[in-house]
């Protein structure tokens, strides 16, 4: 039997973690046009491999992370998984791949992958995935996505648009509505688009 890693992630804990990354961010600029200036410690060591470290050091050399650089690091992580013998598709962007839906966040900014893994290899894939991402892409992804983290007001606006859209599409919305109902409205709703 083959399973496909395709997930929708929801939850207040994850929302809180992303919201914590967001302090001070307001608008979602175009990912290809807007670099982020980063002058601080990386969230994690990029890994012991010289190749991964060298790639990340080159990306961080100018203090900016563009979407193209993020995609290059993510692609290197995927290649690392392929080199370990896994069938991995990617990088993928919404609506392809698994969808990371977080209130206030535009899922088109997050690269994802699909890995076709036999049941007997799921544990090994989990280890390889974690190692390859730590080695090649985690720090770059964290810095790139950090600039798009929503404010509390943006999260609330996103939720309101999602609930309104859910009602328009006849999806269940309780009174008061829940975050899970807003997240489950994606798709067909795309509350990050605004009005």
Image: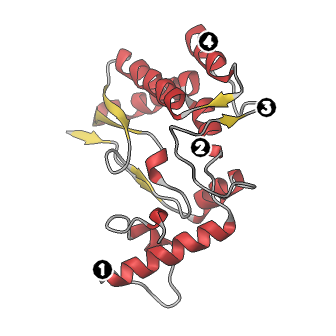
Instruction: Look at the numbered discs 2 and 1 and tell me whether their residues touch, using CB distance below 8 Å.
Output: no
Tell me the crowding category of disc 4: few under 14, some 14 to 19, or many 20 or more residues within 10 angstroms, Cα based: few
Q: Which residue is mark 1?
A: 169
Query: Could you give the CA–CA distance between mark 2 and mark 1, rounded to whole angstroms?
Result: 30 Å
What residue is shown at x 41% (from left), y 25% (from top)? 78
**Residue furthest toward the top?**
50
N-terminal of the two: label 3 or label 1?
Answer: 3
Task: Judge the density around disc 1: few (<14), some (14-19), many (≥20) Cα neighbours within 10 Å.
Answer: few
Cα distance between the residues tagged 3 and 1: 44 Å
**First of labels 4, 1 by sequence position:** 4
- Helix, strand or loop status at disc 1: loop
Q: Residue at x 48, y 24 (%)?
A: 72
In what quadrant of the picture does the N terminus appear?
top left
Q: Is residue 116 left or right of residue 172?
A: left
Per the image, the residue denoted by label 3 is 39
- Provide residue 3's location: percent of width, then percent of height: 27, 41
* Residue under numbered circle 2: 145
The local secondary structure at tag 4 comes to helix
Residue receiving disc 4: 54
């Amino acid at each position: 039997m083959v399973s496909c890693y395709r997930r929708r992630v929801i939850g207040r804990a994850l929302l809180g973690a992303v919201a914590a990354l967001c302090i001070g961010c307001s608008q979602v600029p175009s990912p290809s046009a807007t670099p982020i200036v980063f002058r601080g410690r990386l969230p994690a060591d990029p890994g012991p491999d010289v190749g991964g470290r060298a790639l990340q050091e080159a990306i961080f050399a100018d203090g900016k992370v563009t979407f193209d650089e993020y995609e290059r690091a993510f692609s290197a992580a995927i290649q690392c998984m392929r080199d370990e013998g896994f069938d991995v598709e990617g990088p993928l962007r919404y609506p392809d791949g698994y969808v990371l839906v977080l209130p206030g966040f535009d899922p088109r900014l997050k690269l994802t992958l699909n890995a076709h893994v036999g049941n007997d290899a799921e544990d090994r894939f989990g280890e390889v995935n974690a190692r390859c991402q730590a080695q090649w892409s985690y720090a770059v992804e964290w810095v790139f996505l950090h600039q798009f983290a929503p404010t509390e007001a943006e999260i609330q606006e996103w939720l309101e648009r999602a609930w309104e859209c859910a009602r328009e599409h006849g999806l269940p919305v309780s009174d008061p509505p829940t975050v899970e109902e807003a997240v489950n409205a994606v798709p067909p709703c795309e509350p990050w688009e605004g009005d």
